Image: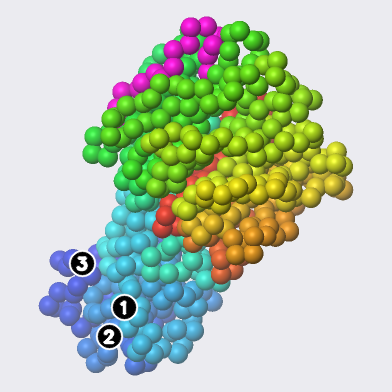
Amino acid sequence: MKNALLAVIGLLLLGCSGGQSSSTNAATVSGVAATGAAVSGTIFLKDSTGHELSMATTDGTFSFDVSALTPPFMLKASWGGNTMYSFAAAAGTANITPLTQIIVAAAASSTDLDAMYLAPTPAAFSAVATNLQAATASLRNSLKPLLASYNADMDPISGTFAANGSGMDGLLDHITVTSVSGTVSVTDKTSGSALFSAPASPTLVNSVSSMSWTNGIAAIAQDPDLKVSGAGDGLAVWWTYTGTGYGSSVIQAQWLNSESSATQISTATGFAMVPKVAVDASGNAIVVWMQSDNQLNNVWVNRYTVGLGWDVPKKLTNAVSAATGPSGVPSISIDGAGNAVIMWNQSDASISSHFDVYTSQYSVANNSWSAPAMLSTGINCAYGYKVVSNGSGNVALIYNQFQRTDGIGGNGDASDIWVATGTTTNGFTTRTKVSSSPNLLYGQASLAIDPAGDVLAAWIQGNNSGYFDVWVSRQLSGGKWDTPKTIANSVTGECYSPEVAFDANGNAFATWEQQSDANGSQYVAVSHFSAVSGLWNSPAQISENIGNTYDQHIAVDPSGNATLVWYQIESAAVTVRSAQYLKASGWSASKLISTMGPTYDGYTVFPVPRVDVNASGKSMIIWGTSSD
């Protein structure tokens, strides 16, 4: 804090705790008003009947005798045309800071605090007082990594902080807080990056956070993955170099809200890369990755158990030559009980450039992995795969398979979309050719499954105009697959990298990279599917026209709210950006998450953004680095 707050210690509840006043100031509401610098202006207090007191302050400190007033109390700091609010359920300490402004807005479920103060009612004040504790706890939990980094994990309203540039004082110096249009937000004052945002509500649901991550971590975090536990703790995994040259990398894992450093979960030998993570309903996790030992690729896994931590890494495959080893990036999914399925590509020594899809299942009951099993035919070359499951154990996987039966295939060869379904405990019982077209497939496919077991597939397929479109097909649980249809209708530009996600009621989003031949741009496109009507809406452009976009990903919560993240090559720098969809208000404008350094050109060196959301609507964003 730039200004010395001379009387802070004396006024912030000496000898008190929990926001309750001592016997010597039982009829006093006192505290400090500060935004990083102390407020020099006027402090106001209103009780629940509308009676108002005021006092001038030059150092931010204030104290009101409220013995003749009726609690609860709303406080306002006013200076230079600015206002900021706080609240006190009873006599005691009630600081006024940007964070108390968020708490009051959350407790009131409204960012129009001017209106509440101007026309107070006992009912409105009582509602805020009732929700104040929950709103405070929600904010502290949501901002836990940020508060911890400044040693500022305290009650913003009733806590004591010193004017020394550290702790809460240091935090306030470095953030900007806004509470407008029904949303509360925290941004980094220096970079302008969005750290946290949420609709104003006592529990701050549908929040989006990136505060656990920095560009410093991203620079060493290669190809990260992310999952958010039911408790709201994000598990990030990535690979990082441990030396120079081939054969020197390890897999790292870190619980972002509860751990201050990462844990190495792979062996220290070989070249470990591109991990994927899944988390069950209890917070147990499994990570799968590809690791090359002596230039032989194998699939490795490690499991995290709540209360016990990480197990030792386990090798699931045993390649005897490069011609029989796994390749590509493994995919993983887990059910609510912790049973998991992974899949990968594996080469066949008998046919050059031939690959098959293999799977393995983890059984919680047996604490063991099944032997790797081929799922594709072994005749047609298979590639482009993903596996998904729901909480009750329904599982589905998607892959492309060339129509050629000589075991090989490549650019220019026709291929089909296949989906296999089953359960995480009993394996795959049905394998269906969802799409067979003479038009080329690009090899990019996505899959989603909802709680009822409905499955949605998306892929890139050429249309009759010579462009690649996004195609989809849906299967209701136990039913037949719909006839594939395009949802992009692209006749003036190509589509790439589709991703689909369900909410809990069978509604869905699809997102992809959309090119425009008209102006040479590339942007994030989204279409929404209604389970009631059975229709997809017209694609919408989500990203602004400030540069071409890449690597978009979407996370949808059970209620149907969504968070998008992507990276964008802008004129001045490569950035990571995000947008949020709320059912009540639609898509927001994009928010800056990070501005990358000069080494990132977006083509040879580029950020890798990831997003995930848990069942209560808490979204987290991270980003890493990759290169061509």
**Is 510 contained in the magenta span?**
no
- Vertically, is 29 above or below 463? below
Mark toward the viewer: 1 or 2: 1
Q: Which quarter shows the N terminus?
A: bottom left
Q: Amino acid at mark 3?
A: Gly
Callout 3: few (<14), some (14-19), or many (20+) C-alpha neighbours within 10 Å?
Answer: few
- Image coords of residue 54 (percent x, y): 37, 85
Q: Is residue 527 above or below residue 461?
A: below
Measuring from the top left, give residue 340's x and y in whole percent.
Answer: 40, 35
Provide the residue designation for mark 1.
129
> Could you say whether the residue bearing mark 3 is in a helix, strand or loop?
loop
Q: Earlier in the sequence, mark 3 or mark 2?
A: 3
Q: CA distance from mark 3 to mark 2?
A: 17 Å
Q: Is residue 213 visible?
A: no
Instruction: Count neighbours of disc 1 (C-alpha within 10 A) and say few if under 14, some if 14 to 19, many if 20 or more.
Output: many
Residue 369 locus on image (x, y percent):
36, 26
The nearer-to-camera label among 3 and 1 is: 1
Binning the other alpha carbons within 10 Å of mark 2 as few (below 14), some (14 to 19) or many (20 upward) gives many
The residue under the point 33% across, 73% down is 131
Q: Quadrant of residue 339?
A: top left
Question: What's under tag 1, amino acid-wise?
Answer: Ala
Q: Which tag, 3 or 1, sits closer to the chain's start? A: 3
What residue did someone put label 2 on?
Answer: 71
> In the rendering, which numbered label is found on residue 18?
3
Residues under numbered marks 3 and 1 in contact, where contact means CB atoms less than 8 Å apart: no
Task: Quadrant for the C terminus, please.
Answer: top right
Segment tinted magenta in the rendering: 310-328
- Residue 624 position, x and y percent, is 53, 35
**Mark 1 in CB contact with mark 2 (< 8 angstroms):** yes
462 displayed left or right of 124: right
